[in-house]
Amino acid sequence: MPELPEVETVRAYIDRCVSGQYIKNIEIFLPRLIKNATAEEFAAALTGQMIQSVRRRGKYLRVQCSGAVSLLVHLRMTGSLLYEEPCRDVPARRILFRLSKGCLTYRDIRTLGCLWLVPSQGKTGISGYDSLGPDGTSPEFTVPYLQAALKGSHRKIKAFLLDQTAVAGLGNIYVDEALFQAHIRPSRRCDRISRRDSERLHDAVVQVLRTGLENGGTTIRDFINGRGSAGHNQDFLCVYGREGKPCPVCGEPIKYVKLAGRGTRYCPHCQK
DNA sequence: ACTATCCTGAGT
DNA sequence: ACTCAGGATAGT
């Protein structure tokens, strides 16, 4: 489900709610979601700790705790974090953190999400996290950086942007939207992208992520922010989920193909 | 550099 | 009954 704008929307709200609270007790309904500890170890390591802040890198959330061990969370397709005060019953709740004042819930329909115990300082030892590239919204993501990364790759641009090691935070929706804004066909090889097009791509990536965030994220199916309400960026998408419908720029029908194992939408007239 | 796979639920 | 879904990675 969530890409950078959705994860950031959740982070901002949850951070405000839980920072400064203590973890009083943890209930684990689905232990296999915890990837590097048993349910007992997980509960023992986090119970009694104070939550300092909730941070984000790419699509990962890091709940920074007062002790040596913190919590790393990846929502994958259908995970979400919800905060409630007072606690209520939540469907598909997989883990419940009882805090000093309210409850933090990890909810997940498809149960593909991941939670890890990580050191509070330094490298996490989680390969996906430690190998993340700069966030698409960070100042380190520059035109020269992107151009250098593109030059070194023969892959299709769609696969390149979905891979989190060059740029972090993009997923299937925002990749399709960014390539549309940049007038680049998803099947184009990275090393065949001109300097001018890579500039446009850089600006498009930054812009689609910023806009997504301003709109509170994209709710297609079941994304909800930490408060349980939907985003509205879905109302502004140009290609994602619009196959067969007219391109907002030229009116040509949006095409659907399978690329990098994912459904991919583009305008055959505007994107070359 | 691909594809198969982990899951559940919705849509056809 | 079968396909698809906002993600990532182990295996080929």
Image (cartoon, coloured by chain):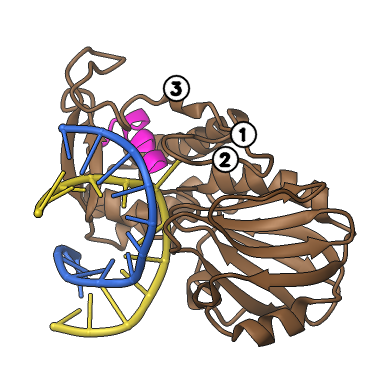
Chain colours: A brown, B blue, C yellow
Mark 1 vs mark 3, foreground winner is 1
In this rendered view, identify the residue nearer to me: A150 or C9: C9
Separation of marks 2 and 3 at Cα, in angstroms: 17 Å
The correct choice, above or below, for A43 with respect to A86 in the image is below
- In this rendering, position of residue A66 left or right of residue A254: right
The residue pinned by badge 3 equals A236
Residue A231 forms part of the magenta stretch: no
Q: Is residue A58 visible?
A: no
Q: Residues within 10 Å of mark 2 (few under 14, many from 20)?
A: many
The residue pinned by badge 2 equals A224
Magenta range is A173-184
Whether tag 1 and tag 3 are in contact, CB under 8 A, the answer is no
Instruction: Return the x and y of residue A137 as percentages of the image width and height.
Output: 58, 45
The residue pinned by badge 1 equals A229
Separation of marks 1 and 3 at Cα, in angstroms: 18 Å
Label 2: chain?
A: A
Instruction: Return the x and y of residue A46 as percentages of the image width and height.
Output: 76, 77
- Which amino acid type is shown beneath numbered disc 3? Phe
Mark linked to residue A12: none
Q: Quadrant of residue A120?
A: bottom right
